């Protein structure tokens, strides 16, 4: 259990970010250490070399002016003042013979190496030596004198090496502390960066448990996390509206379909218990077919409304001349209007009115409104279809001189299955206006209704002339 939790922690982004942070932090610290170390070491060596070379030059001047005895005396004095264990001085003949020197008892193992080369180079030089038995290395400067002999000066690098050792030790301790602090800070930063993702995860888990109304709160972890939370919330809005839609359909199906199905069942039952002659069966079959057709149409309309309303429907956005749609609808309903003694009048501009849209759906919306206008207008009335346009929108108005809509019903007539009491005697499902509104809204438009009871109703479809996808 414990090892499982540990291994899942090792796989978290927080842990990996912490690791990265610590690695980068320690890499940078090491780089800084190396730069300081190298520059400090070279500075110390340069300082030592300069001191050695200056002293060698002074000895050379002395040797040239006062001879070997004076140099011998100066070697001893200088070595005693600086410490015979720390420095040595020698004057070597070109053959390597020691002509003068400080006390060399502490410097066993010194060789007169490279004398020939030094003598021919005629240039002062500095090199590093390790003598057996001595803990610290020494730096040796050689300066050829004018007579071919060589002045050699050596100094133990004790001070420098001890200083560098201390620097390494101090850095080692500081590095461990810095690594621990860096790791901790890295973990805090990674946790902060990941807290937004954790909020999304937490919200998802809650939603998974049925709390659909929950949303991811926006924090201050940065724009990316807020963009994620925002996108996630938008997706949730969508899912919630789809679920709401689905629930409403289920409720509607249960409520609205029960009555016609019960009626169909009742008819079948009556026929079964009746006299059983063929005509009665035929009548029953015809009624069942008619009732079933109406049910199928209702179900299809409900689905169409749900799909269009939720934005799932893929709407075509082809450029359409809206005049054609209006004319076709008027032609289609003309016979029905004539049968009822209603006059249809068209008022459309001569030039094309182009809107981006889905032809069959817009045809259906216009047809639903026109159908209602004819249905709810008594004989002798008029239905006027007019088309107006400006640069941004097109307006199709269907106005009738019919029964009008009572004030109390105005806010509800676009609800699914809502029918005004006055129109219950007329066949209908209460879905026509809902579908028309869903279609027009999916096009980025709206339907505006005006009505006065007894003196007619007008429905105006307003459509944008440029495409505005939802
Ligand atoms: P349906 O016409 O099938 O009943 P609709 O959704 O098309 O369903 O209309 C809803 C209700 O709005 C109708 O039942 C009717 O009461 C009212 N209505 C719609 N259009 C008109 C109109 N032009 N004149 C008067 N009432 C109307």
Image (cartoon, grey):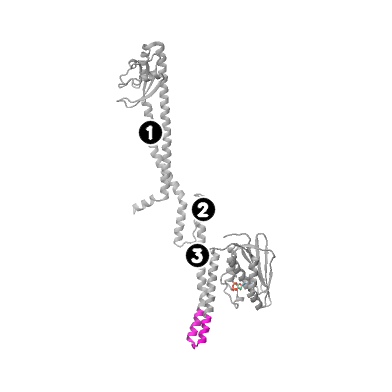
The residues bearing labels 2 and 1 have C-alpha atoms spaced at a distance of 48 Å
Mark 1, residues whose alpha carbon is within 10 Å: few (<14), some, or many (≥20)?
some
Corner quadrant of residue 329: bottom right
Residue 268 as seen in the image, left or right of residue 132: right
Mark 2 residue CB less than 8 A from any atom of ligand 1:
no
* Residue 379, position as x, y percentages in the image: 67, 78
In the rendered image, which residue does mark 1 sit on?
168
Point out the stretch of residues depicted in magenta.
Answer: 262-287
Task: Using residue 116 as the reference point, say whether residue 410 is left or right of it.
Answer: right
Query: Tag 3's secondary structure?
Result: helix
Asked if disc 1 is less than 8 Å from ligand 1, the answer is no
Q: Are marks 2 and 3 in contact (CB under 8 Å)?
A: no
Crowding at mark 2 (Cα within 10 Å: few <14, some 14-19, many 20+): few
At 65% from the left edge and 59% from the top edge, which residue is drawn?
A: 392
Left-right relation of 441 to 143: right
Q: Is residue 172 visible?
A: yes
Of 32 and 440, nearer the camera is 440
Of the residues under marks 2 and 1, which one precedes in the sequence?
1
Q: Which residue is mark 3?
A: 243
Q: Quadrant of residue 338?
A: bottom right
Query: Mark 2: which secondary structure?
Result: helix
Which residue bears the numbered disc 2?
Answer: 227
User: In the rendered structure, which disc, 2 or 3, sits on the residue that comes first in sequence?
Assistant: 2
- Figure label count: 3
* Coordinates of residue 302 in the picture (x, y in percent): 54, 70
Q: From the top left corner, tell me how far across and down residue 115 is, in percent.
A: 36, 19
Does the magenta portion include 273? yes
Taking the image in four quarters, ligand 1 sits in the one at: bottom right
């Amino acid at each position: 259990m414990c090892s499982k939790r540990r291994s899942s922690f090792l796989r978290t982004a927080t842990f990996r970010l912490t690791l990265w942070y610590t690695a980068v932090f320690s890499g940078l610290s090491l780089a800084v250490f190396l730069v300081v170390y190298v520059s400090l070491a070279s500075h110390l060596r340069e300082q030592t070399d300069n001191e050695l070379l200056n002293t060698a030059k002074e000895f050379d001047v002395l040797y040239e002016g006062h001879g070997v005895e004076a140099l011998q005396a100066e070697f001893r004095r200088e070595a005693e003042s600086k410490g015979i264990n720390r420095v040595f001085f020698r004057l070597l003949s070109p053959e390597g013979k020691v002509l003068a020197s400080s006390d060399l008892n502490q410097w066993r193992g010194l060789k007169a190496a490279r004398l020939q080369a030094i003598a021919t180079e005629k240039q002062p030089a500095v090199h590093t030596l390790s003598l057996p038995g001595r803990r610290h290395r020494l730096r040796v400067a050689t300066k050829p004198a004018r007579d071919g002999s060589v002045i050699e000066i050596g100094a133990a690098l004790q001070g420098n090496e001890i200083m560098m050792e201390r620097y390494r030790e101090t850095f080692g301790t500081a590095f461990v502390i810095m690594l621990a602090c860096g790791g901790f800070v890295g973990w805090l930063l990674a946790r902060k960066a990941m807290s937004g993702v954790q909020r999304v995860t937490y919200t998802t888990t809650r939603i998974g448990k049925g709390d659909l109304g929950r949303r991811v709160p926006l924090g201050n972890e940065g724009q990316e996390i807020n963009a994620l939370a925002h996108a996630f919330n938008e997706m949730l809005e969508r899912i919630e509206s789809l679920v709401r839609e689905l629930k409403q359909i289920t409720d509607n199906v249960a409520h609205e379909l029960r009555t016609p199905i019960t009626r169909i069942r009742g008819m079948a039952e009556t026929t079964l218990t009746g006299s059983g002659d063929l005509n009665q069966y035929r009548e029953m079959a015809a009624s069942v077919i008619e009732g079933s057709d109406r049910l199928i149409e209702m179900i299809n309309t409900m689905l169409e409304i749900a799909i269009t309303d939720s934005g799932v429907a893929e709407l075509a956005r082809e450029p359409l001349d809206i005049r054609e749609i209006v004319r076709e609808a008027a032609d289609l309903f003309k016979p029905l209007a004539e049968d009822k003694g209603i006059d249809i009048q068209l008022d459309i501009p001569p030039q094309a009115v182009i809107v981006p849209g889905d032809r069959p759906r817009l045809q259906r919306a216009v047809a639903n409104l026109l159908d209602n206008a004819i249905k709810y207008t008594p004989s002798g009335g008029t239905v006027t279809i007019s088309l107006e346009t400006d640069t941004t929108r097109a307006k199709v108005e269907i106005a009738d001189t019919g029964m009008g809509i009572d004030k109390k019903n105005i806010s509800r007539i676009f609800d699914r299955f809502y029918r005004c009491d006055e129109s219950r005697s007329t066949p209908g499902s209460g879905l026509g206006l809902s579908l028309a509104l869903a279609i027009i809204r999916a096009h980025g438009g709206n339907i505006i209704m005006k009505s006065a009871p007894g003196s007619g109703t007008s429905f105006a479809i307003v459509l944008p002339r440029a495409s505005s996808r939802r």
